[in-house]
Image (spheres, rainbow, N blue to C red):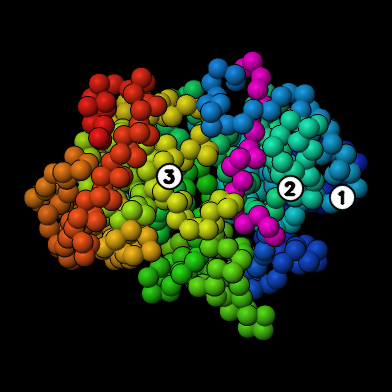
């Protein structure tokens, strides 16, 4: 049987997906929670939140993501970063997954990726778990109820955690699989309950499609000045670097917290919600995000809680350090209703430096910005990927390599062209360690980071004095109101300056070695800005 609202000409049967049990189309949040509770998928929490655990998978599985190698995409995919799957393997995977689905209940959400209608895509999400439907209903954009009657999907995603792939038969790496077929307009996910795979698959899709239309897809958060979308800032960064936290600034309007496009019309959010890390989240430091953890329908993922009171433990990382909450964008009081902004006036590249070497903020020339964008230096923080238990220094090009199907130089060129055309001030912000490396130093104070960003975004920092960093060549402010001068010079924060020098030399060498791969593909000005 079928339940809910759906285009009568576009049911799963019309897509060749037949023989299922009950199919629930486009249920709203209360109905999804009712179903999830009936199916024992989780627990009702304070304020009507939904508390879930995702089993052994509490983070992304980037090594299990595959792109089907067909002639139409073969010359455009960055194969060094995206594992290939044969068309035959995908066909077998699809056939076996559909056979596995027969007789089981499924939940369908017809949603939109992209706030700008000119570049948006319609996505049908088919999920085995009711709470996955709730999650993706938050994270993508919801069409108006009356528009469902005519909804046709550009792409369909099927997520079946109980299905396990056969590496030999399906041409994949393990029993867990995320398979993208651009020709068949299908994405198949199996063997993992981690909800983040749902949204990241759609982002990867947009990251492939949009460059063909001259749109720069960005793994970034974004905000703009109140009442002034022209004053837009974007924040590039991997999970755990502060994208969500720093963009949710009460003094500015939030456009979105994870993925955006930059077109000739300006900036637009891909999403309809936020997926925030909650480890060490505090009511005092981040009141808006904290408040969502007691609001109806928020999905609370992999957090320890008191069985009697349902109180959340924000400090207990027993299940994972990658504990999260997913909520609709309008739960943030200063969120933009349109999720649109102007051309970025400021571009912030967030890095979590586990070496404790980089300053808390530095001004970048356009060439230096390209260098750091392609380098994508940060530390993977605990839990965001399988097997990561403590900060690991890494270079993730474009600050989002796991979601980039095309070669990084293609995205870099797009960004370079748009900065040249529209102008933007570029900044490198370190939210990692100061006073020593991870294990010795301490995490950068969030209040200092906010003060530095405020000064950068309102233009006062640019008018101040800068020094040139002897190791990395960028400009570092000498003094910023509300921030201790010593914090701006990381060498002074170390007890042993010689130890800092050795650590800095080590990091410079890492930058240099990593960037060799891009030298044949870049302009002379970017090559001249290279470190080491």
| Residue under the point 74% across and 47% down | 191
Q: Which residue lies at the image location 55% right of the left edge and 17% below the top edge?
A: 75
Q: Which of pointers 2 and 1 lies earlier in the amino acid sequence?
A: 1
Vertical placement of 404 versus 459: above or below?
Answer: above
In three-dimensional space, the C-alpha distance between marks 3 and 1, rounded to whole angstroms, equals 42 Å
The numbered mark, 3 or 2, whose residue comes first in the sequence reads: 2
Which residue position holds label 2? 191
Residue 263 coordinates in the image, percent (x, y): 41, 31
Q: Which residue is mark 3?
A: 394
Asked whether the viewer can see residue 416, the reply is yes
Q: Are marks 3 and 2 in contact (CB under 8 Å)?
A: no
What residue span does the magenta drawing correspond to?
A: 55-72
57 in magenta: yes
**Numbered mark located on residue 104 in the image:** 1
Dominant SS in magenta: loop
Above/below status of 274 relative to 292:
above
């Amino acid at each position: 049987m079928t339940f809910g609202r759906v285009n009568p000409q576009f049911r799963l049967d019309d897509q060749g997906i037949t023989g299922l049990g009950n199919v629930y189309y486009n249920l709203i949040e209360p109905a999804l929670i009712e179903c999830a509770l009936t199916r024992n998928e989780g627990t009702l929490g304070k304020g009507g939140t939904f508390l879930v655990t995702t089993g052994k998978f509490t983070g992304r599985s980037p090594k299990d993501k595959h792109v089907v190698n067909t002639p139409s995409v073969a010359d455009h995919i960055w194969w060094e970063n995206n594992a290939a799957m044969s068309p035959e393997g995908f066909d077998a995977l699809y056939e076996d997954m559909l056979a596995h689905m027969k007789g089981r209940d499924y939940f369908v959400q017809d949603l939109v990726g992209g706030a700008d209608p000119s570049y948006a895509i319609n996505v049908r999400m088919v999920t085995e778990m009711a709470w996955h439907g709730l999650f993706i209903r938050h994270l993508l954009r919801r069409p108006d109820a009356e528009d469902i009657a005519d909804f046709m999907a550009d792409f369909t995603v099927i997520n079946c955690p109980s299905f396990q792939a056969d590496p030999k038969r399906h041409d994949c790496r393990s029993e867990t699989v995320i398979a993208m077929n651009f020709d068949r307009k299908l994405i198949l996910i199996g063997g993992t309950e981690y909800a983040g795979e749902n949204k990241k698959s759609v982002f990867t899709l947009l990251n492939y499609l949009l460059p063909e239309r001259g749109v720069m897809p960005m793994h970034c958060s974004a905000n703009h000045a109140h009442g002034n979308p022209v004053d837009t800032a974007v924040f590039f960064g991997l999970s755990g670097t502060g994208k969500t936290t720093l963009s949710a600034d009460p003094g500015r309007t939030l456009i979105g917290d994870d993925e955006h496009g930059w077109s000739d019309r300006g900036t637009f959010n891909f999403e309809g919600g936020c997926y925030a890390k909650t480890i060490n989240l505090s009511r005092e430091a981040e009141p808006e995000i904290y408040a969502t953890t007691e609001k109806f329908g928020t999905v609370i993922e992999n957090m320890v809680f008191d069985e009697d009171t349902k109180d959340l433990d924000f400090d207990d990382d027993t299940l994972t350090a990658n504990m999260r909450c997913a909520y609709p964008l309008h739960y943030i009081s200063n969120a933009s209703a349109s999720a649109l902004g102007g051309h970025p006036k400021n571009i912030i590249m967030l890095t979590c430096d586990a070496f404790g070497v980089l300053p808390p903020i530095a001004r970048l020339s356009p060439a230096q910005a390209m260098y750091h964008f392609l380098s994508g230096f940060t530390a993977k923080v605990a839990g965001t990927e399988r097997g990561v238990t403590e900060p690991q220094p890494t270079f993730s090009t474009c600050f989002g390599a796991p979601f980039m199907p095309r070669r990084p130089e293609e995205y870099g060129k797009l960004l370079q062209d748009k900065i040249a055309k529209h102008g933007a001030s570029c900044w490198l912000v370190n939210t990692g360690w100061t006073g020593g490396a991870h294990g010795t130093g301490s995490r950068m104070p969030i209040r200092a980071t906010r003060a530095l960003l405020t000064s950068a975004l309102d233009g006062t920092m640019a008018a101040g004095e800068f020094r040139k960093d002897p190791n990395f060549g960028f400009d570092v402010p000498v003094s910023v109101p509300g921030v201790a001068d010593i914090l701006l010079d990381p060498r002074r924060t170390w007890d042993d300056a010689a130890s800092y020098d050795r650590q800095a030399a080590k990091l410079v060498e890492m930058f240099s070695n990593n960037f060799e791969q891009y030298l044949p593909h870049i302009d002379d000005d970017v090559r001249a800005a290279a470190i080491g």
